[in-house]
Image (tube, helix red, strand yellow):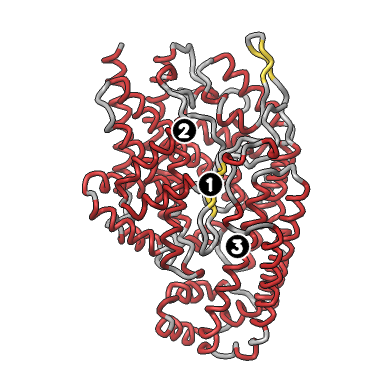
Amino acid sequence: MTNLPLRSEVPVNDKWDLTLLYSDENAYRQDIDALTVLIKKFLSTRPEWTDYHNIIHNIPEYENILSKMYKISSYAQLNLSTDYTDEKLQNLAGECNLLMDHAYTELAAFDASINNLSVDDLQACIKEDGKRAFFWRKVLENKSHTLEPAVEKALTALQPALDFPYNLYSLVKQTDLNFHCFTTGGQKLPLDFVTFENKYQYDPDTERRRAAFAAFSEDLRQVGNTFASAYNARVQNEKIIADLRHYNSIFDYLLQKQQVTAEMYHRQIDIIMRDLAPIMRRYAKLLKRVHGWDKITYADLHVPLDPSFTPSVTREEANKYVESALKIMGEDYSKVVHKALTERWVDFACNRGKSTGGFCATPINCNSFILLSWNKQLSDVFTLAHELGHALHFHYVNENQTYLGFEPSAYLIEAPSTCNEVLFSFSLLSESNNLRFRRWVLSTMLSNTYYHNFVTHLLEAAFQRKVYLAVDRGENLGFNALCQLMKDTLTEFWGDTVELTPGAELTWMRQPHYYMGLYSYTYSAGLTLGTIIAKRIYTEGKAAVDDWKTMLKAGGTLPPLELARLAKVDLSTAQPLEEVINYLSDIVDELESLTAEME
């Protein structure tokens, strides 16, 4: 049972302003009509798609159509994300999905014409269409995995069915999963996904926090088989596509999209599981000692080191915190941050049916839209700074790239966002030399930015790797098998330092990242670069900022290693990751010494 308000009860200033995208639903539907006309006109040029010269000539209009499709689908999906219980919004999104699927199927003929170009023609495209050389290189790289046009068209038409597992997961999580009240200390308390993940898991009251975790886990378990079936369907679909396209494994298929080698992927997981685990066990022991617990359980890991020193943060204070921290990025950056915070780019509301967590969506040639659930915690300020990093990244991309160069490799997609979190932490540290304040900032930095990206999401990635290895072996994974893999992963990282109470094994049910291919590991990859560049920005100032902006503006026009080099960071070796892990070890060292000094 939840005590969250209905969406209709949320104050306007707590909601994002989607009129910045379309003035109203009528304008949205008029754009759909315009899209239909554009596609029809574009398809009339099909007789011209016989040689690479004409294909290059038609690419700009193809990009224009894709941009409009992205804008239209963004409107439908952003509306739905604020209230999955609203049947009208469900229908709006459903209609939009059908429209997009039909449009992509129609455009498959142009995709086929591109894929049918010979190697010589593609090499000519790289030379003659320099603005999109990166795109033509990708087509050339993928050529051996491209299927016959009829098969490609069929796969495009099947996309709704392939997306169904994730859609089912989202719908069940936001609408059908009902949590019961739980009782602790003689109090009957409400429970829902948002309240647990944004409030109870940070609660300094041990009895209430552990009771909330137990109740949350008990209700989550009720949909275990449904979620397991959805997730298994997703990964089996990916296996089928990988085999159809003649990849040696699911990993090869998913990593080629990111332009990442298997070595880079496995290195990120292996080093963190090996080298960060002992550091985080030390932090867990410090939490246990400071709080006087007889044991530390999985339900205790998010508790602040010094909860009585953790202030409640108003929205106005959050804006000041973030604007002050990001001022170092320059006037152009700061102006966009200010617009985002004052022109309702952000949906702060906590309401029934709203998507959990946080995200940033940026339609082409439009401002960004940021979703989060505001609970007046410092962790919310970190989330706000994080999502603004995405918004500013795509602000620069929008100004400098066309549609086909818009999306960077997922390997570095989290770097601009996590860089902002680190800059925010540095800004806080500069405010005071008080020992308790410094300990609070360092522990908050560790338990928010680094725990979230180097522990939570990395453990997702380690679990996910086990899943894909099993699927590559031909295994079918049910609820119990998935829970065991999750438990094994958590045990490997935490050892016997943390007691894995019942419910820990259900962690795989809580995040949507498992439905997004090999995405979870990219949080730590992004934060590796984000940390290195944030330290450069803080010590070198404008020169480092300029390098960083050069990388941001490049969008998806270069592979990730080359993008990082624009910011003067070499990610080809383990050295940057090891540097960040050593930095985290230093933070735990200082937290231990500060605690000893204060006791």
Q: Is residue 441 visible in this depiction of the protein? A: yes
Task: Give the class, few, some or many, for how many residues have Cα within 10 Å of label 1's Cα (few <14, many ≥20).
Answer: some
Image spot of residue 238 (x, y percent): 63, 57
Q: Residue 550 falls in which quadrant of the image?
A: bottom left
Q: CA distance from mark 3 to mark 2?
A: 30 Å
Element assignment for label 1: loop
Q: Is 467 placed left or right of 571 in the picture?
A: right
Mark found first going from the N terminus, 3 or 2: 3
Q: Is 594 placed left or right of 80 in the picture?
A: left
Q: What number is the disc on residue 71?
A: 3
Residue 10 vertical position relative to residue 205 in the rendered view, above or below: below
Q: CA distance from mark 2 to mark 1?
A: 20 Å
Mark found first going from the N terminus, 2 or 1: 1
Element assignment for label 3: helix
Q: CA distance from mark 3 to mark 1?
A: 18 Å
Image spot of residue 314 (x, y percent): 47, 30
Q: Quadrant of the N terminus?
A: top right
> Which residue does the image show at 51% across and 47% down from the upper left?
520
Q: What number is the disc on residue 344?
A: 1
Q: Is 56 placed left or right of 572 in the picture?
A: right
Q: What number is the disc on residue 176?
A: none
Q: What number is the disc on residue 379?
A: 2
